[in-house]
Image: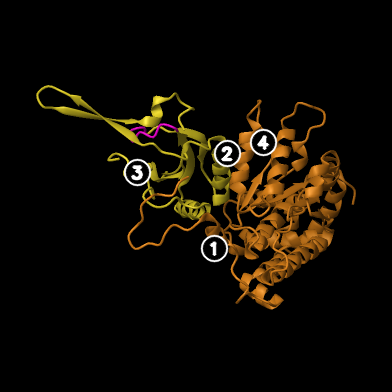
Chain colours: A orange, B yellow
Amino acid sequence: MGAPDYSIPGSVAPRPASEAVSDAAPQSVAGAARTVAAVLAESQVEAVLDELERDLVGLAPVKQRIRDIAALLVIDKLRMNLGLQAETPSLHMSFTGNPGTGKTTVALRMAEILHRLGYVRKGHLVAVTRDDLVGQYIGHTAPKTREVLKKAMGGVLFIDEAYYLYRPENERDYGQEAIEILLQVMENQRDDLVVILAGYKDRMDTFFKSNPGMSSRIAHHLDFPNYSVDELQQIAQRMLAQRHYHFGAGADAVFRDYLERRIRQPHFANARSVRNALDRARLRQASRLFAERERELSQDDLTTLLPADLLGSRVFADTQP
Amino acid sequence: MMTNPTGRLTQGQFSFLPDLTDAEINLQIEYGLRRGYAWSIEYTDDPHPRNTFWEMYGMPMFDLRDAAGVMLELRNCRKTFPHHYIRLVAFDSTRGIESITMSFIVNRPPSEPGFGLQRQEGPGRTLRYTLTPYATARPEGERY
């Protein structure tokens, strides 16, 4: 591409390309943060970490790991300010855990933390599943995957139930193509986007076993533990408070009993099951109030869930205490 | 060279300026994305000013948040068509506007021969003028 053979009045001669590149390099060492406190104050990442601590019940190992990652990023930032190592660390992660253990919620917070520290430029989260990446006929997959990747650039790409991408039983499955494109971008454009894979523990383990390239490109494997009954009860309290409900006298103990029975049943999905149980309790409360046509309902009536609303659940009928 | 005084094609924005560097292109894309425009990439080897229909390189990129996605496609396009004209086009989908709001050339052939002016004599002393790009004398794909 030739430079024009004229000049604009009042301008200097066009700069050679190499000069322009050095202009775009990170700011000079002078005036850059030198202490952990300075980086934290600059990025306000501590606020997000505190929020994480406050808003999410339990998940102690996950929170610890996120603190570790944040600490590493802060120290890396300081090293970079001293010109020690400018290479972006690999930040791709895998979240494994049972359903309803908070993988998506934590991924959203992760995007925020990475954004505050300046490792992703925009800090948005694009959540996709197999359907958004894999096409239906030959030549459909690559553009589809690339489009999703382009949308996620500058932010975090969250692939839910990532193990579905690889279907070993069908050797002509297009999922493999999506994985290859994903791997390529994960490797070459590490500073443009962060990929988080999520799924159930055992299935993700087989997924990584059959895709060693994927496993080796993911630096952080986070395992989300199941919630205990106490934690689930705390979660229930917060969900109710958010929707302006509360447990009436005795309902607390009944709900605990409900949880202990429900955990033993199949398809228990932690916080999601709690939410569903509360939704059904709200239904029963609504029809209980609906039956009393002539009664004048106070605010307390409308916001209280009584033990009867919970005891109506199928779980109590099907199981022994 | 009356028809080609600068020795280069001047169409769209910034075409009288020195070629934008990648960093500058990046800033322009960011500006467009902040305004909610959808970028797309087009290429051609027919530089006639009335040729408004350039070929699309891939689909228009809606819902992007960061310029890196557009730059990725631009790099691919430059690799595929190193000697074509390539331009970036921003589409504003706001109701009532729904049209192209930005457009600038980001890749040029190494040499741009310009246009030939043909005069056709009509009835009386009428003269009709036609611009013909020298490059289009050769078939598509072999022009630059």
Secondary structure at badge 4 equals helix
Count of picture labels: 4
CB atoms of marks 2 and 3 within 8 Å:
no
The answer to whether residue B63 is left or right of residue A218 is left
Secondary structure at badge 3 equals loop
- Residue with the mark numbered 4: A131
- Specify whether disc 2 shares its chain with disc 3: yes
Disc ID at residue A23:
1
- Residue with the mark numbered 2: B79
- The chain under label 4 reads A
**Label 2 CA crowd tier, 10 Å (few <14, some 14–19, many 20+):** few
Amino acid on which the number 4 mark rests in the picture: Asp
Depth check: give the residue in front, B107 or A119.
Answer: B107
- Which is closer to the viewer, label 4 or label 1? 1
Task: Give the image location of residue A26, x and y in percent.
Answer: 60, 65
Q: Earlier in the sequence, mark 2 or mark 3?
A: 2
CB atoms of marks 1 and 2 within 8 Å:
no
Q: Which residues are magenta?
A: B45-51
Which of the 4 quarters of the picture holds residue A236? bottom right
Disc ID at residue B96:
3
CB atoms of marks 4 and 3 within 8 Å:
no
Task: Give the image location of residue A62, x and y in percent.
Answer: 79, 60
- Which is closer to the viewer, label 1 or label 3? 1
- Looking at the image, can residue A229 be seen? yes
- Which is closer to the viewer, label 2 or label 4? 2
Amino acid on which the number 3 mark rests in the picture: Gly
When the figure is inspected, residue B139 is found, relative to residue A290, above or below; the finding is above
The answer to whether residue B116 is left or right of residue B83 is left
Marks 1 and 2, how far apart at CA: 25 Å
Amino acid on which the number 2 mark rests in the picture: Lys
- Specify whether disc 2 shares its chain with disc 4: no
Depth check: give the residue in front, A199 or B14.
Answer: B14
